[in-house]
C-alpha cells in the first residue's frame, strides 16, 4: 500500500495567529505573555508613582495579584480596583481579569 498523507489526518489550514494562540493555551503560556505586556504598559496605565510602588504583578485565574510596597497606596488602589480592572481589560482588548488582589 502506498503512502497517502491524506489518510493520516485531515489537513486544515489555519491562520498562524490561531495556531500560536492554541499552543500558548495548551502550554499555559498565555497568562505569562499577558503579564509581560501588562508589566510593560503598567506605568502608562496607572502612572509612574503607582508603577514605582508596584513590586510584582501576576495574573492567575483571571485575578491580578499586585504587590505594593506602600500600605497607603495599597488602600487607595483597593478602593479603586474597578478602575484597574477596566483599564487592564481595555488595554488587553478583552476580559483578562475580573478581580484584583493586593499584598
Image (tube, helix red, strand yellow):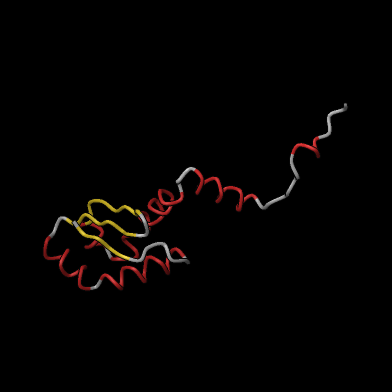
The residue sitting at the front extreme is 1
The residue sitting at the right extreme is 1
Q: Quadrant of the N terminus?
A: top right
The residue sitting at the top extreme is 1
Front in this rendered view, residue 49 or 16: 16
Residue at screen point 39% across, 50% down: 36
Q: Is residue 9 above or below residue 43?
A: above
**Left or right of residue 32: residue 48:** left
**Left or right of residue 28: residue 3:** right
Q: Quadrant of the C terminus?
A: bottom left
Residue 20: where, in percent of width, then height?
57, 48
Q: Is residue 98 above or below residue 5?
A: below
User: Residue 70 occupies which quadrant of the picture?
Assistant: bottom left
**Left or right of residue 95: residue 46:** left
Front in this rendered view, residue 84 or 63: 63
Residue at screen point 22% across, 51% down: 55
Residue 87: where, in percent of width, then height?
36, 69
Front in this rendered view, residue 55 or 5: 5
Q: What is the tally of numbered marks visible in this picture? A: 0
User: Residue 88 occupies which quadrant of the picture?
Assistant: bottom left
Residue at screen point 41% across, 62% down: 96
Residue at screen point 61% across, 48% down: 19
Residue 57: where, in percent of width, then height?
29, 53
Q: Is residue 3 above or below residue 24?
A: above
Amino acid at each position: 500500500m502506498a503512502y497517502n498523507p491524506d489518510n493520516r489526518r485531515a489537513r486544515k489550514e489555519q491562520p498562524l495567529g490561531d495556531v500560536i494562540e492554541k499552543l500558548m493555551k495548551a502550554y499555559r503560556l498565555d497568562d505569562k505573555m499577558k503579564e509581560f505586556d501588562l508589566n510593560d504598559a503598567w506605568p502608562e496605565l496607572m502612572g509612574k508613582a503607582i508603577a514605582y510602588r508596584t513590586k510584582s504583578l501576576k495574573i492567575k485565574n483571571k485575578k491580578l495579584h499586585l504587590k505594593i510596597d506602600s500600605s497607603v497606596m495599597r488602600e487607595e488602589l483597593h478602593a479603586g480596583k474597578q478602575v484597574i480592572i477596566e483599564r487592564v481589560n481595555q488595554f488587553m482588548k478583552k476580559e483578562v481579569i475580573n478581580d484584583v488582589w493586593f499584598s
